[in-house]
Amino acid sequence: MPTTPTPKTPEIHAVLFDYGLVLTGPPDPLAWFHMKEIFAASEKSFHTAYWAHRHDYDRGTLNGQAYWRAVANDLNEPLDDPQLAKLIEADTALWTVPNPDTIAWAATLQRSGLKTGILSNLGDAMETGVLARCPWLADFTHHTFSHRLNLIKPDPAIYLHAAQGLGVPPANILFIDDREDNIAGARKAGMTALQYTTHEAFLKAMQAANLATLLTP
């Protein structure tokens, strides 16, 4: 019987992480509740308004204040400055539930001397809040936050910017993201890329990609 060829081992010099749902876990349901409560909005109407302008926020077309005013406008609700501050705080809390498995692995990579980076679609107020709540992000070699560049994943240009910031060619970077379209974008940019769904599935994917040695560098 013909044997299955062993996959070629990519030469990885840096690991590039998405932030949300990779280094963090599922969104905090209490934070969702607090934001909906400010607007007295239904689940459906709030989520529709929340996501309608999110790409513009992440891209930097809207800053944090303009984004939340657009959400309020969609919901036909007024928004004062104290409410705005509470929404930004709750939105930050929503996306700062840590994923201890990937955070610990990233720290192991950093101790081994391997470069690590962040590539995240993130708005300006979110960046400020996330960096304040997650001091461990300072240990990453380079951060690429989308609003700074007026680009969002999966635009190939944002991956190339991250590679340049790391000082590593795309072919020598492993990128990890929870979304299939972002994984496809990374591969188009020349990176090795794996989707993160659960940690157990990720470990199996690393084995299948012949990258298990990176798990214990």
Image (cartoon, grey):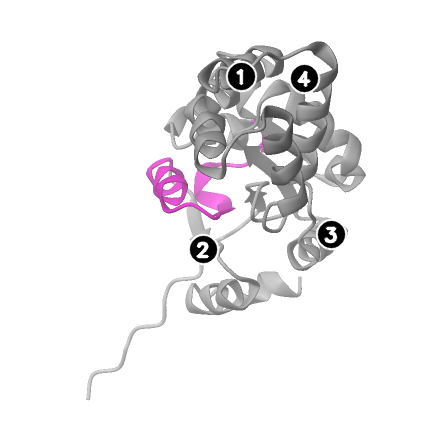
Residue in the foreground of this view, choosing between 135 and 159:
135
Q: Are marks 4 and 1 in contact (CB under 8 Å)?
A: no
Residue in the foreground of this view, choosing between 152 and 73:
73
SS state under label 1: helix
Q: Is residue 102 above or below residue 89?
A: below
For the residue marked with disc 4, what is the amino acid? Leu
Query: Mark 3 vs mark 2: which is more N-terminal?
Result: 2
SS state under label 3: helix
Query: Mark 4 vs mark 3: which is more N-terminal?
Result: 4
Answer with left or right where residue 141 lies relative to residue 150. Answer: right
Q: Which residue is mark 4?
A: 84
Q: Quadrant of residue 33?
A: top right
Mark 2 crowdedness (10 Å alpha carbons): few <14, some 14-19, many ≥20: some
In space, the residues marked 2 and 4 are separated at their CA atoms by: 46 Å
Tell me where residue 207 appears, x and y as whole percent. 48, 69
Please state the extent of the stretch shown in magenta in the rendering. 165-189
Closer mark to the observer between disc 2 and disc 4: 4
SS state under label 4: helix
Q: Which residue is mark 1?
A: 72
Q: Are marks 4 and 3 in contact (CB under 8 Å)?
A: no
Q: Which residue is mark 2?
A: 10
Mark 4 crowdedness (10 Å alpha carbons): few <14, some 14-19, many ≥20: some
Query: Mark 2 vs mark 4: which is more N-terminal?
Result: 2
Q: Which residue is mark 3?
A: 107
In space, the residues marked 4 and 1 are separated at their CA atoms by: 10 Å
Query: Mark 1 vs mark 3: which is more N-terminal?
Result: 1
